[in-house]
Amino acid sequence: MLNQTSSHIDMMIHVDDATAKSRLVEQITKCDGVIKPRVVSEKPNLLFVSYDPARFDIRSVPSIARSLGINAQIVEV
């Protein structure tokens, strides 16, 4: 899911292990250009990442997840 405003984009991420999602959110929050990762409580395997595309490459999320032993995919609608 892509939602673009003038300064940032929101992208949906699917995390295979919902119990590990908080570790991924913590790591992504540290990345330059990430405005805010948001957890969707009613969908335990999903999160949204708001980011500045000029400063953060959303395609790096799966590799960040792998470095933590987590499997995550960008959801493109």
Image (cartoon, grey):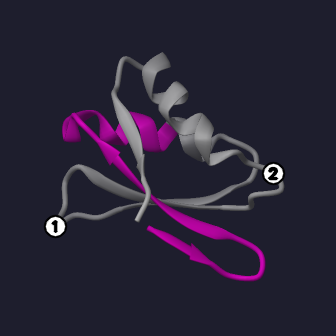
Foreground residue among 76 and 65: 76
Can you tell which quarter of the image residue 76 is in? bottom left
Tell me if mark 1 has few (under 14), some (14-19) or many (20+) residues whose alpha carbon lies within 10 angstroms of its own. Answer: few
**Residue in front for this viewpoint, 76 or 67:** 76
Residue type indicated by callout 2? Arg
Residue 36, image x, y percentages: 57, 61
Residue 48 picture location, percent across and down: 44, 61
Most distant residue in the bottom direction: 6
Nearest the eye: 65 or 75: 75
Q: Is residue 75 above or below residue 32?
A: below
Quadrant of residue 1 within the rendered picture: bottom left
Query: Against 24, is 56 above or below?
Result: below
**Labels 1 and 2 touching (C-beta < 8 A):** no
Q: Amino acid at mark 1?
A: Glu
Query: What secondary structure is marked by label 2?
Result: loop
Which badge, 1 or 2, is on the more N-terminal residue? 1
Q: Nearer the viewer, residue 73 or 42?
A: 73
User: Gap in Å between the C-alphas at discs 1 and 2?
Assistant: 30 Å
Viewport quadrant of the C terminus: bottom left
Is 2 covered by the magenta stretch? yes
Q: Position of residue 39 (x, y in %)?
A: 35, 59
Task: Determine the residue positioned at 34% across, 28% down.
Answer: 71
Within 10 Å of the Cα at label 2, are there few (<14), some (14-19), or many (20+) other Cα atoms?
few
Q: Find residue 42 and name its label.
A: 1
What is the span of residues highlighted in magenta in the rendered image? Answer: 1-26
Rendered residue at 45%/29% (across/down): 65
The residue positioned 19% from the left and 61% from the top of the image is 43
Q: Which mark is residue 55?
A: 2
The answer to whether residue 8 is above or below residue 61 is: below
**Does the stretch in magenta take in 4?**
yes
